[in-house]
Image: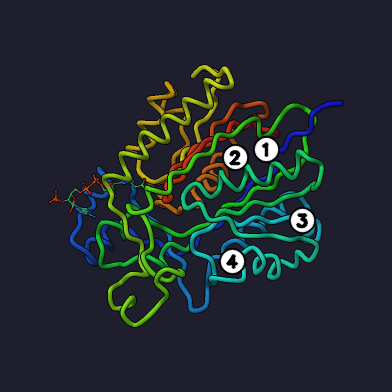
Amino acid sequence: MTKVTAAITAVNGYLPDYILTNKELEKMVDTTEEWIISRTGIEERRLLKGEGKGSSDMAVEAVKGLLAKKGMLPTEIDLLICATVTPDLVFPATANITCDKLGATNAWGFDLGAACSGFIYAVTVASQFIETGKYKKVVVVGVDKMSSIIDYTDRSTCVIFGDGAGAVLLEPNQEGLGIMDSILKSDGSGRHYLHQKAGGSVKPASHATVDAKEHFVFQDGQPVFKAAVKGMADVSAEIMEKNNLSSEDVSWLVPHQANKRIIDATANRMGVGSDKVMLNIQRYGNTTSGTIPLCLWDYEKQLKKGDNIILSAFGGGFTWGAIYVKWAYNS
Ligand code: UT7
């Protein structure tokens, strides 16, 4: 019997309309367009504006478009996994809220928190349900409204992040295409360098935590940068080696979009030329869980059935990892 693999059979994205440019940021904090572009590669990012709008609203738009592409009804979804660090609420899960707003009444779902590695963690989890034959249609959404946890007076973080959502559909494949392998890692001792200090069970929200701005992202950039360069490059090289892939065999690298310099270091280590590296950080910044599916969405038309693709990420936790995908369709 042919082995069942989990294949990505559709991809879609959603970005809010509001564009925050580097020029605009120059008016808000002590920064320059030149600094932001040369240190990160980011030219602009999108923010979700509007009272009462949260991550689920972007997730819903991304999934609606996904279903439309496949001519699928929301009721056909078996499971929806939402990767996010900016859920609508602490509970219930944004996956549940998203399913309700979509009318995905036959699906169950949950949120997965692995910061910037959330999407690759979630795809790996989702693929298990397909490979075992348990489910036929699993949606993974990577979504973050980073603007909800960013201090727009802190120049070290506010220039980096943006809002957005990307979604993929996973279905069974018997042609040897889809998710071939994944390597996932974590090291909780890295948590001190990138986290949100308050709002969890250790330090619940109080007047004092709000006054101390502890509900915003805290990042000590340099240690994270160093760990990201090593982690993403090492794991990407490791998955190539494990699957006997040479740099010529790799059609595309789909890196988490945190910093253009981290992306370049990863591509160099893999021996992959810049023409094979998906890049949209210049337009969206770091959308945390959204970066990888948004790249797949932007480059979908260039992808061909059988292409060898490496997805690679590093994020808070620390969490990191890579997935080897054989692309399953021509669009
Ligand atoms: O996605 C999840 C994982 N996150 C990452 O992978 C992010 C990893 N880290 C980074 O990408 C980089 O560390 C940053 C982009 C966050 C910062 O770049 P850097 O080259 O590491 O800068 P730095 O933190 O070493 O700061 C260098 C200088 C400092 O000034 P002094 O001390 O040299 O006078 C900063 O205060 O740049 C200053 N600086 C800025 N200057 C202008 C920091 N932010 C800004 C800014 N505009 N926005």
Question: Percent x, y for residue 9?
Answer: 71, 41
The image shows residue 109 at horizontal and vertical percentages of 69, 60
Amino acid at dot 1:
Ser
Q: Quadrant of the C terminus?
A: top right
State which tag comes first along the sequence, 4 or 1.
Answer: 4
Q: Can you give x and y, in whole percent of width and height, for residue 157 in the image?
A: 31, 58
- What is the secondary structure assignment of the residue under circle 1? loop
Q: What type is the residue that disc 2 sits on?
A: Glu
What's the residue type where badge 4 is placed? Answer: Ser
Q: CA distance from mark 4 to mark 1?
A: 27 Å
Which residue is label 2 attached to?
A: 300
The quadrant the N terminus occupies is: top right
Q: Position of residue 205 (x, y in %)?
A: 41, 77
Q: Which residue is mark 1?
A: 331
The answer to whether residue 315 shows anywhere in this view is: no
Residue identified by numbered label 3 = 77
Q: Label 2: state its secondary structure.
A: helix
Relative to 155, 325 lies left or right: right
Judge whether 93 appears above or below 122 on screen.
below
- Tell me, for residue 53, which label it has, or none: none
**CA separation in Å, label 1 and label 2:** 7 Å
| Label pair 1/3, CB-CB below 8 angstroms | no
Secondary structure under the numbered disc 4 in the rendered image:
helix
